[in-house]
Image: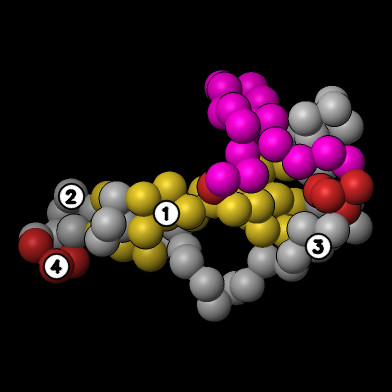
Amino acid sequence: MVTRDGEPVGTVAEVLENVREHIFDGIVVAIPGGNTRFVDAPEIARITQSMVTLTLNADEAAALPESDPKGAREFRANPSKRFGRLWKKR
């Protein structure tokens, strides 16, 4: 993951979505030192197979908030379950 001016920020740790409303919520970024930060969806300019580019510059990226472990979580399909149990929390 890099800023709009090409400065590295960290690596993608989780992709967050609001499953009920089918909305991409943002990304949790693992930064050097073992901490994580939350990047809200509007702050992401582009996602490719190998890179995420932010709309933020390096100073703004350094001020990103810590991720909230109780916030939105990533979900994956579990086809072995029926109806309400189709989605399983990771």
Q: Is residue 13 visible?
A: no
Kind of residue at disc 2: Pro
Q: Report, in whole angstroms, how far the alpha carbon at label 1 lies from the one at label 2.
A: 19 Å
Q: Which mark is residue 17?
A: 1
Name which of mark 4 and mark 1 comes first in the sequence.
1
Towards the viewer: 57 or 22: 57
Alpha-carbon neighbours of circle 3 within 10 Å: few (<14), some, or many (≥20)? Answer: few
Q: Earlier in the sequence, mark 1 or mark 3?
A: 1
Which quarter of the image is occupied by the N terminus?
top right
Q: Which residue is mark 2?
A: 79
The residue segment tinted magenta is 42-58
Residue 90 part of the magenta-drawn span: no
Give neighbour class at mark 2: few <14, some 14-19, many 20+ (Cα, 10 Å).
Answer: few
Q: Which mark is first along the chain, 2 or 1?
A: 1
| Secondary structure of residue under mark 4 | helix
Which of marks 3 and 2 precedes in the sequence?
A: 3
Residue type at mark 1: give it: Glu
Q: Residue furthest left?
A: 83
**Residue 27, visible in the rendered structure:** yes
**Image height check: is 66 above or below 59?**
below
**Between marks 2 and 4 in the image, the one whose residue lies nearer the viewer:** 4
Q: What separation in Å lies between label 4 and label 1 (alpha carbons)?
A: 17 Å
Marks 1 and 3 close (CB-CB < 8 Å)? no
Residue at position x 38%, y 64% in the image: 89
